[in-house]
Amino acid sequence: MTVDYAFGGAQAESSPVLRVADLWKSFSGNVVLAGIDLEVNAGGVVALIGPSGCGKSTLLRCLNLLERVDDGQIWLRGQDITDPRVNADRVRARFGVVFQQFNLFPHRTVLDNVTLAMRKVQKIPRAEAEQRGLELLDRIGLADRAQEHPDRLSGGQQQRTAIVRAIAGRPEVLLLDEITSALDPELVDEVLTLVRELAETTTIVMATHELAFARDIATEVLFLDGGHVVERGAPDAVLTDPQQARTSEFLRRFRRGAL
């Protein structure tokens, strides 16, 4: 069965799907994001790389308003979602988010995990939500596990289920936060294979330490350090011929396994 993952988010558009201007965020006086600018076009894949604590995860959490920004603006399809009058829950429903941990409900079946947000947030009838959920689970080879609980799945299967849950509601932007970091090495490939397929049609912003993977699928790479975008550009340029000394240092240390 072929399932359309585009969900209306990858068609050509005259303006970015997501735009960030001069975004600042601090915690207890510690500046975590300092003047971040970002644009993501429909179907674009932006990879955020950098050392631990550089602000990648905080940026993702700010994009869908899990963290309120201190200053700056974020536009989603032209709407200023940092306007305090905006309904944050409605904004969050327009994003799909997958975290490092799977965050599946252990007491619910795989199918319930995939369909719960569709039924409770988007008010999609159960029969329609379950049909969509089963189609997606079939696409990733887990339809036969639909009535299992998450603890009966491998780590890779759980993370693929979490990704399917994130895309089942047909989000406008998919946010991925180091989604392979909690997986055993042998399970990483099956998750990246799914993301690779999604990247053909879906607008994605992802924080990742899988640099080879980012080089393959990203349309733009941003290297963050100390809350600043130190360097940005095409994946080949940033990852193989960086122009900033700090980027070069990071890549050398990363490849030596020193990070």
Image (tube, rainbow, N blue to C red):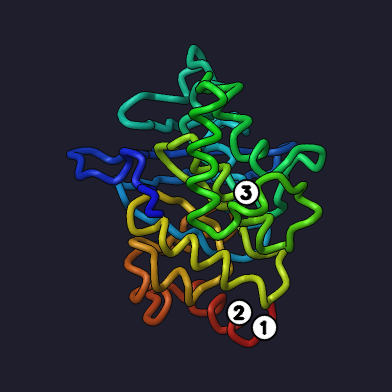
Whether residue 55 is visible, yes or no, is no
The N terminus - image quarter:
bottom left
Q: Quadrant of residue 158?
A: bottom right
Which one is in front, 78 or 112?
112
Q: x%, y% of residue 169?
A: 49, 34
The 10 Å Cα crowd at callout 3, few under 14, some 14 to 19, many 20 or more, is many
The 10 Å Cα crowd at callout 2, few under 14, some 14 to 19, many 20 or more, is some
Tell me the number on the disc at residue 257: 1
Q: Is residue 135 above or below residue 125?
A: below
Q: Is residue 9 left or right of residue 130?
A: left
Q: Amino acid at mark 2?
A: Phe
Which one is in front, 179 or 112?
112
Is disc 1 in contact with disc 2, using a CB cutoff of under 8 Å? yes
Of the numbered discs 3 and 2, the one sitting upstream in the chain is 3
Q: Is residue 35 above or below residue 51?
A: above
Report the residue marked by disc 3. Answer: 162
Q: Residue at x 55, y 57 (%)?
A: 207
Where disc 1 sits, the SS reads loop
Q: x%, y% of residue 191?
A: 57, 64
Q: Amino acid at mark 1?
A: Gly
Q: CA distance from mark 1 to mark 3?
A: 29 Å
The 10 Å Cα crowd at callout 1, few under 14, some 14 to 19, many 20 or more, is few
Q: CA distance from mark 1 to mark 2?
A: 5 Å
Report the residue marked by disc 2. Answer: 254
Q: Residue at x 53, y 27 (%)?
A: 127
Q: x%, y% of residue 173?
A: 43, 41
